[in-house]
Image (spheres, rainbow, N blue to C red):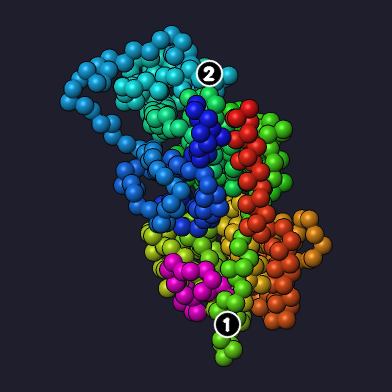
């Protein structure tokens, strides 16, 4: 690629991520970190979407040298008001076309996204004044009368302001220069990426979903206590609209496995844009790692995860406790950070105490390669996953997995493109009896356990090596960059 003078310059890729890198360890964050390190000849920038300024610059990774800038977007924020009132619109005025676009956004009918993008690219636009102004009120009243006239209007109005506060703040992201905008989800990241693509006419947009964002938010809202009744549907519809925006503007949409790709198409993504790009691990990192002490008589069951509700650690603890009552040589190692949801971590500790559970260890953050070889098997009881790296890393170390039937867990453990056999056991979500039986089954025969671990190793070497993932994304980046050059 060359500039106006014909001099070659380094390609620019802007990663856009919500609530993960570089603020949280593991999972999607590890994947982003790996991608940036994989392409040292590309200058990366990052738009990091976080809840509030309280999270600002709290990075848990040492940023790679080729990550040249980080711009933070706060989904809850207080507007900075200049003492010079000329720099801020005293009375927000929007055109009839802009008001019509707002109406299309709220109603979800043929959303006029490019007019929305133009509106929020105004230098001095006030989100507060827009949300509290007459134009937004008129838009909400129209939507209310047409769809929800039986609801209390005050509750409805404040729900709509809450929904659109976060989106409008995201839309205030300034223009970032890049050749490719690479969003690691749809949602807020996808909308920001779509707006950046429109503001950078020669750029391309790629969406890489590790889980299907719309479905994950739907599951969260259904379980949530802070929103009730029909208001759950309103929030879910908002996330669907944002995902449809991302799918519409994207040039490529990737997923980790075939069923996820099918869900993207079902949700409205153009089939021709989609492709499957499995995760990959550095298998060489899991050679010659520390192994279990020969004198250790425990059957070590390892859970490498963030201690958060989505990992359903409480179900794991309870199931392990009942399994331990039948097999006292079992030991559970819960390995990973516990500071993301401190209240939930405390609840997990309290559960261990109230059950009188034995042989459960919380290690806190670890270096995976220092512990994984000492495990006999891994366990994951999540209620939502994409294609868990912890299972692939376990396979690379020759360790089988017990996992709930979410995301691609069954495909990894039982195989999709090979006939190697089972590399562990898959259980229904939150089914304590099934998880108890799986723990007892995998721990009763050490030879069978090791055999399943070897099956996992063959599977990861066959299809899930980091080299395969690097090659895939190298091809995708070059394809998009060449399309730009053309």
Rendering coords of residue 212 (x, y %): 60, 43
Between 468 and 419, the one nearer to me in the picture:
468
Q: Callout 2: helix, strand or loop?
A: loop
* Residue drawn 46% across the image and 69% down it: 366
Q: Is residue 431 left or right of residue 147?
A: right
For the view shown, which residue lies furthest in the top direction? 96
* Residue drawn 43% across the image and 8% down it: 96
* Residue drawn 27% across the image and 17% down it: 89
Is residue 436 visible to us here? no
Q: Quadrant of residue 424?
A: bottom right
Q: Sequence order check: which comes first, mark 2 or mark 1?
A: 2
Rendering coords of residue 19 (x, y %): 45, 46
Q: Is residue 40 within the magenta segment?
A: no
**Residue 444 drawn above or below residue 4:** below
Q: Quadrant of residue 133?
A: top left
Q: Quadrant of the N terminus?
A: top right
Which mark is drawn over residue 292? 1
Which mark is drawn over residue 112? 2
For the view shown, which residue lies furthest in the right direction? 419
Which mark is drawn over residue 481? none
Label 2: how many residues lie within 10 Å, few (<14), some (14-19) or many (20+)?
some
Between 362 and 313, the one nearer to me in the picture:
362
Q: Which residues are magenta?
A: 354-374
Q: Is residue 373 within the magenta segment?
A: yes
Is residue 42 visible to us here? yes
Between 199 and 124, the one nearer to me in the picture:
199
């Amino acid at each position: 690629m060359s500039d106006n003078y014909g001099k070659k310059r380094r390609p620019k890729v802007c990663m856009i991520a919500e609530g993960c890198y570089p603020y949280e360890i593991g999972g999607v964050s590890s994947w982003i970190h790996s991608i940036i390190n994989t392409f040292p000849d590309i200058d990366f920038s990052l738009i990091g979407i976080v809840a509030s300024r309280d999270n600002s610059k709290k990075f848990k990774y040492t940023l790679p040298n080729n990550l040249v800038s980080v711009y933070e977007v706060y989904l809850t924020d207080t507007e900075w008001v200049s003492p010079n009132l000329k720099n801020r619109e005293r009375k927000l005025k929007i055109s009839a076309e802009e008001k019509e676009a707002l109406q299309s956004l709220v109603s979800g009918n043929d959303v006029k996204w490019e007019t929305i993008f133009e509106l929020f690219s105004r230098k001095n636009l006030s989100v507060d004044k827009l949300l509290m102004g007459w134009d937004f009120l008129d838009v909400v009243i129209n939507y209310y009368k047409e769809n929800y006239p039986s609801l209390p209007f005050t509750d409805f109005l404040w729900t709509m302001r809450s929904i659109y506060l976060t989106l409008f703040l995201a839309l205030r992201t300034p223009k970032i220069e890049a050749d490719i905008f690479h969003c690691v989800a749809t949602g807020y990241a996808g909308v920001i990426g779509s707006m950046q693509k429109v503001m950078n006419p020669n750029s391309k947009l790629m969406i890489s979903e590790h889980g299907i964002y719309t479905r994950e938010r739907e599951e969260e809202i259904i379980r949530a206590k802070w929103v009730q009744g029909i208001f759950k549907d309103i929030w879910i519809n908002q996330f669907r609209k944002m995902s449809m925006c991302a799918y519409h503007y994207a040039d490529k949409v990737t997923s980790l496995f075939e069923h996820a790709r099918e869900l993207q198409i079902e949700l409205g993504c153009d089939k021709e844009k989609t492709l499957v790009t499995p995760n990959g691990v550095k298998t060489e990192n899991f050679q010659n790692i520390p192994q279990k002490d020969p004198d250790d008589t425990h059957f070590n069951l390892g859970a490498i995860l963030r201690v958060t509700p989505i990992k359903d650690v409480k179900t794991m603890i309870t199931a392990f406790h009942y399994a331990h009552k039948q097999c006292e040589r079992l030991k559970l190692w819960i390995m990973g950070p516990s500071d993301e949801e401190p209240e939930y971590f405390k609840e997990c500790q309290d559960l261990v105490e109230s059950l009188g559970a034995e042989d459960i260890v919380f290690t806190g953050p670890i270096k995976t390669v220092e512990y994984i070889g000492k495990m006999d098997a891994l366990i994951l009881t999540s209620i939502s996953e994409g294609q868990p790296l912890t299972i692939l890393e376990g396979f690379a170390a020759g360790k089988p997995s017990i996992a709930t039937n979410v995301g691609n867990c069954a495909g990894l453990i039982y195989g999709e493109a090979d006939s190697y056999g089972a590399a562990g056991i898959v259980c229904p979500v939150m089914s304590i009896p099934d998880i108890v039986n799986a723990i007892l089954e995998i721990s009763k025969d050490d030879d069978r356990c090791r055999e399943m671990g070897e099956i996992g190793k063959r599977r990861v070497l066959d299809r899930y090596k980091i080299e395969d993932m690097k090659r895939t994304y190298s091809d995708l980046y070059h394809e998009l960059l060449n399309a730009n050059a053309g």
